[in-house]
Amino acid sequence: MDAPDETPVATQEPTDQVRELTQDDRFRFIGQEFRDAIEAIRETHVELSPAALKLDSVEQFWEGAFKGPRSLSEEDLELLKAAFVDVPDEGLSAQELVDRVFEAVKHTAWGPEFALNFMRRVYRTPRGPIFHNSMLISAVSAFETHLARLAEEYYRCAPAALHDLPRESVKEFSLRELQDLGSVDEAIEIAIERRVTQLMFGSLTDWKKFFADRIKLDFADYAQIWDEVKEVFERRNCVVHNDSRASRRYVQNYSETEIGAPLYADVAYVEWAIERLELLGVLFHTQVWVKFALNQKEVIDALEITAFEALKDQRWVFSRALYEKWTQLPLSQAESHMAKVNLWITSKEEHGLAAIQSEVEAWDISGSDELYSLARLCLLDQVDGAFKLLPALIDRDKIDGRALATWPLLRPLREDPRINEHSEIMREYLHDENEISAAERLEVEAETAMDLDSFTSEVIDSGTDGTGEPEVTTSG
């Protein structure tokens, strides 16, 4: 039950090279491209949220009210404190707060200007929600792009579908266009682009209808996630088309707030929305791929890698949903055992050992590999027994350095000092990973150097500075 192969799939190939891949490789590429896009949005949101929050902080608030060469002194602060004495339990309205500040500083030379700037700061649009809303828009855009890639691949797998609709059966290319294109393949690609572009201007309901009509797959099969994603899309529509305020349709379907009330996204909501979009995107991608897979094992392996990565990242809900989908695929006995073990890990981490104890104890592994005995012991936190089995499993290559270092199942062993007896095998794994990373860096650096050499040669040959303008030289 070694950790699955984690070899990444490149996601920066030129479009024509992607089309030359096998059908299964193209679907793998589409899935990796989507997950990379979502991960980039998630990381950006996590890293920049503190900076966005700081823009609405008290420190920024006070400093922003001073626009002259001076800043708040101790004496200034003492004056301002008077505005916040005896604040009623129900708080102050914005106007009451502005009036109090003005009364506190109106006799100073800087007071009136400060009060005016303070009023502007009180009534200004919060900066944090602008950032969060922009991340929400980006995440929805990545999801829509993913659906477009799946639609494109559907048409490539079933090009006859380009003629299905009566509207599409009329003449699509002029004779001149056909002469300019020069090949049927190019004509098909343009036809696909036109179909998908039209879908991109539609709604989430249009996407649902397209996949239900064409591939007989329905987003509603994932009822709860589908409803949650619909709410995310409706909120995005309010942000983009209704000045980030609740529309009548949003209030009727998803909220008890008033029509026109601000819809200010916060850190927690955006994190939740990104995960919902990613989950539906991965699950539906798997469903479409299964329909057209030349080799079902390709789908099984790709989904398990994604599920295991989420397991290592302690994304228990996300990982569990993927493993539950995985169990619906035609798995081998070993893969079924792995799914069961990793599903138990997610439940144990979320709800504690008691949530899985009776099931694990009743697990029938008679006649199975000794590896599953180790799994049962680790799930039940029976560390002494697990350490007795571990050396033999390592000797027989049933447990490798990667599994020992990264598999969440073995965390109870990693937290025990006795794991130091097996530190060498983990060191070898980390050393190998470092060599792979170093080789990848060297390859990227070499490619970059080649590009720069090529660019330099072109500039020298053309006598330009790379901008299309003649190179300017000086002589002294």
Image (cartoon, helix red, strand yellow):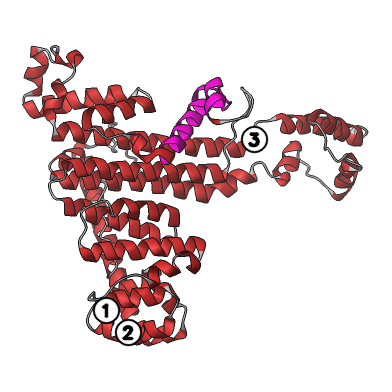
**Above or below, 47 relative to 209:** below
Residue 74 appears at what percent x and percent y? 86, 50
Amino acid type assigned to the residue bearing label 2 in the image:
Leu
Residue 47 appears at what percent x and percent y? 51, 51
Amino acid type assigned to the residue bearing label 3 in the image:
Pro
The region drawn magenta spans 225-253
Task: State yes or no: discs 2 and 1 in contact (Cβ < 8 Å).
Answer: yes
Residue 106 appears at what percent x and percent y? 90, 32
Pair 3/2: label in front = 2
Residue 112 appears at what percent x and percent y? 85, 30
Q: Secondary structure at mark 1?
A: helix
Main SS, magenta residues: helix
Q: Secondary structure at mark 3?
A: loop
Foreground pick, 137 / 261? 261
Foreground pick, 12 / 379? 379
Q: Give the mark nearer the N terminus: 3 vs 1.
A: 3
- Identify the disc placed on residue 389: 2
Q: Secondary structure at mark 2?
A: helix
Pair 3/1: label in front = 1
Crowd around label 1: few <14 · some 14–19 · many ≥20 (10 Å): some
Foreground pick, 207 / 242? 207
Between marks 2 and 1, how big is the CA–CA gap? 8 Å
Between marks 3 and 1, how big is the CA–CA gap? 59 Å
Instruction: From the image, tell me which residue sits under label 1.
Output: 370
Q: Give the mark nearer the N terminus: 3 vs 2.
A: 3
**Above or below, 252 relative to 451:** above
Q: Residue at x 57, y 37 (%)?
A: 265
Q: Residue at x 8, y 13 (%)?
A: 175
Instruction: From the image, tell me which residue sits under label 3.
Output: 126
Amino acid type assigned to the residue bearing label 1 in the image:
Glu
